[in-house]
Image (spheres, grey):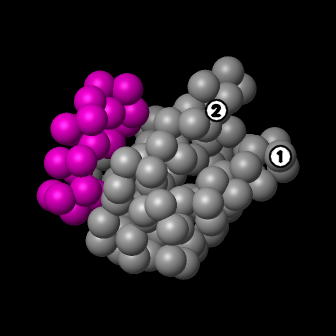
Amino acid sequence: MEIKQEKQNSYISLAPIGDLDANSSLEMDECIQDWLEKGESNFHIDGQELKYISSAGIGVFISHLDEIRARGGKIIFSHLSASVFDVFKLLGLTEIVTIVKEGAEIAPHF
């Protein structure tokens, strides 16, 4: 898996490419941790090229959620495929994280 990273004005955009599963979740975890250590607390996860996410992949985001919120930050997901969105919905994450359809919809949230 590859992760495109881009610093925007008020948030960090991370775009995983491929599958986010037990094998690749460590890479995403380290990526988020690196940005947190640099003082960032707002994250946009662009799922446009995310083909599959497992519970281990979702666990990465959940493991950082408390720290992000404690810093006054947010994590927002966009461009999720129907199958990836279904995993979020099945696990009840649609109730605790913000998911928007298009990337342009994220700016008002930060």
Left or right: residue 33 versus residue 28 is: right
Left or right: residue 29 versus residue 62 is: right
Q: How many numbered markers are drawn? A: 2
In the rendered structure, does residue 109 fall within the stretch colored magenta? no
Residue 25 lies, in percent from the top left, at: 53, 60
Q: Looking at the picture, does residue 82 appear above or below residue 66?
A: below
Q: Residue flagged by tag 2: what amino acid is it?
A: Ile
Residue 64 lies, in percent from the top left, at: 61, 37
Q: Residue flagged by tag 1: what amino acid is it?
A: Glu
Q: Magenta segment, which residues?
A: 79-99
| Disc 2 target residue | 68
- For image coordinates 62% across by 49% down, the residue present is 11
| Disc 1 target residue | 37
Q: Few, some or many C-alpha atoms within 10 Å of disc 2 (few <14, some 14-19, many ≥20)?
A: many
Quarter occupied by residue 97: top left
Residue 45 in view here: yes
Checking the image for residue 28, the label placed there is: none
**SS class of the residue under badge 2?**
helix
